[in-house]
Image: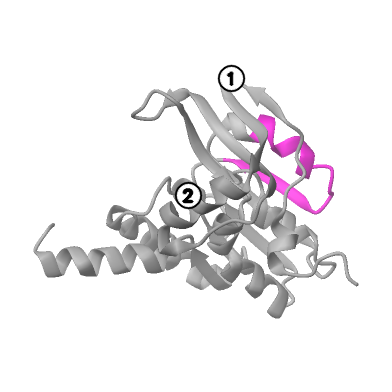
Amino acid sequence: MTKYATYQDRMTVDIPEGEVDGLRVERFEVTGLELWYLKQELRYGRGTKPGTYTKLVDTVNLDHKGNPTLWMSDTDAEKHDHLQAVAQIRLAKAERVLINGLGIGMVLAAALSFKHVRHVDVVEYDERVIKLVGPHYLKDHRVRIHHADAYEQVHVWPARAQWDVAWSDVWPDISDDNIPGMDQLHKYYKRHATWHGCWARRECLKLRRELDVLGIK
């Protein structure tokens, strides 16, 4: 039996718990009861198996209820959103990978699990994320983290920069407002990457179509 039975296994993170300037990495448990609620509430009805998971929360910028804002976690539902990128890395036997948005490093962890990956560039805007999460992944000599805005970084890369797979995940939620930014990044990376994808692009486009039908701009 292999260490990684599925793509989701490759995205499980093992970064240590910690906090930098109000940004916190912590473990949490999903129980059977919570699973029932997650199945009802998670979009598209995707649930998460009971178990221990890792999340990234912002205790400075609170949500509308005054609670720490959940940025992301490595639950099954969230891993599902990144399957396309991990599949491309494997099927293309990618050697050079670009990731816009570090987060807790789910896609990065998956990329590093493949022996054929030789180099990964990660662009991350929030310095707290780099300080909190970055050191864990920088132990691997294949990783280089760039502290920059993903939209501005396209003007910094060398003219001949090229990647086999590029993945952009720099949006906090699903909104049709994300589409122009996705188009902007895709315009650049379609020339510099064999394949480029954006987190939740399909859902954003679907939302735009639904709003157009309703006449909502």
Relative side of 122 to 206, left or right:
right
- Which residue is under mark 2? 37
In the picture, residue 136 is in which quadrant?
top right
Relative side of 89 to 21, left or right:
right
Q: Position of residue 4 (x, y in %)?
A: 81, 66
Specify the color scheme: one colour
From what the image shows, is residue 213 above or below residue 55? below
Magenta range: 130-147
Could you classify mark 1 by the number of other residues whose Cα lies within 10 Å: few (under 14), some (14-19), or many (20 or more)?
few
Q: Position of residue 67 (x, y in %)?
A: 44, 26
Amino acid at circle 1: Asp
Q: Position of residue 202 (x, y in %)?
A: 39, 69
- Which residue is under mark 1? 21
**Quadrant the N terminus occupies:** bottom right
Looking at the rendered image, the disc whose residue lies closer to the viewer, 1 or 2, is 2
Could you classify mark 2 by the number of other residues whose Cα lies within 10 Å: few (under 14), some (14-19), or many (20 or more)?
few
In the picture, residue 175 is in which quadrant?
bottom left
In the picture, residue 115 is in which quadrant?
bottom right
Amino acid at circle 2: Tyr
Q: Residue furthest front?
A: 33
User: At 58% from the left edge and 19% from the top edge, which residue is drawn?
Assistant: 21
From what the image shows, is residue 117 above or below residue 147? below
